[in-house]
Image (cartoon, helix red, strand yellow):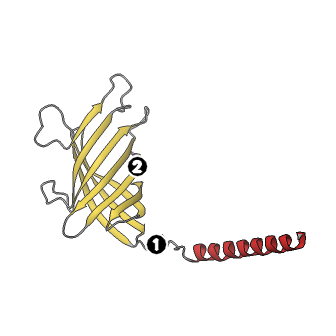
Amino acid sequence: MASLIEKQLFKSLFLFFLLVLLFSDTVFGSRKTLDQKKPCKHFSFYFHDILYDGDNVANATSAAIVSPPGLGNFKFGKFVIFDDPITMDKNYLSEPVARAQGFYFYDMKMDFNAWFCYTLVFNSTQHKGTLNIMGADLMMEPTRDLSVVGGTGDFFMARGIATFVTDIFQGAKYFRVKMDIKLYECY
């Protein structure tokens, strides 16, 4: 009787390991390799932000929710929520191709630095869906890379890099950033 149980146990373990081996080969065989030199999608957009200052209700696209005084000269602790137009060119009045909806906050006391978290919401004939972008914006650097961490619709589960280049900066009232988005995982 013990011999019969041992044979059944051996057969069960053998079958289990065979299935694990077969399944792991299937999983590893279907993985994509990423070629950093060849993005599967590439876009260039302009991000326009007009901060509410008390007088520009009609034009403002963002508002400071928290702005603590006395924490240095670099806006440390300031928290801004935005709903900014994204255009194909530098003109703020151009037809938006998307909206950037999210927030940023200044997180460095010794220099200008912000952390962004937002969703690009596309609703046009060309694209439908969202791209989620987040990361540190080291403002004093000529170019900054933020992570594209996901998406929906035409950009389902997309991953890649959004490179920021400041195009114009007019104090605290207005800035325009060129976003060069390269997606390396597209489904």
**Left or right: where does residue 25 sit relative to residue 92?**
right
- Of the numbered discs 1 and 2, the one sitting upstream in the chain is 1
Residue type at tag 2: Glu
Dot 2 crowding, Cα within 10 Å, few <14, some 14–19, many 20+: few
Image position, residue 147 (x, y; %): 43, 56
On screen, residue 80 above or below 31: above
Name which residue lies at 62% across and 74% down: 23
Asked which quadrant contains residue 27, the reply is bottom right
Residue occupying image coordinates x 43% and y 74%: 38
- Which one is in front in this view, the residue at disc 1 or the one at disc 2? 1
Q: Would you place residue 146 above or below residue 52 in this image?
A: below
- Report the residue at 14% width, 60% height from top: 95
Residue 9 location (% of width, % of height): 80, 70
173, 43: nearer the viewer: 43
Q: Circle 2 — which element?
A: loop
Residue that sits furthest to the front in the current view: 1
- Where in the figure is residue 22, as x and y percent of width and height? 65, 77
Q: Name the quarter where the C terminus is drawn.
A: bottom left
The quarter of the displayed image where residue 72 is located? top left
Residue 121: x and y in percent read 26, 57
Task: Tell me the kind of residue under disc 1.
Answer: Lys
Q: Residue at x 16, y 53 (%)?
A: 92
> Which residue bears the numbered disc 1?
37
Above or below for 44 versus 177: below
70 is higher (above) or lower (below) than 64: above
Residue under label 2, please give it: 141
User: Which residue occupies the foreground of this view, 36 or 34?
Assistant: 34
Locate the N terminus by quadrant.
Answer: bottom right
Look at the numbered disc 1 and give the secondary structure of its residue: loop
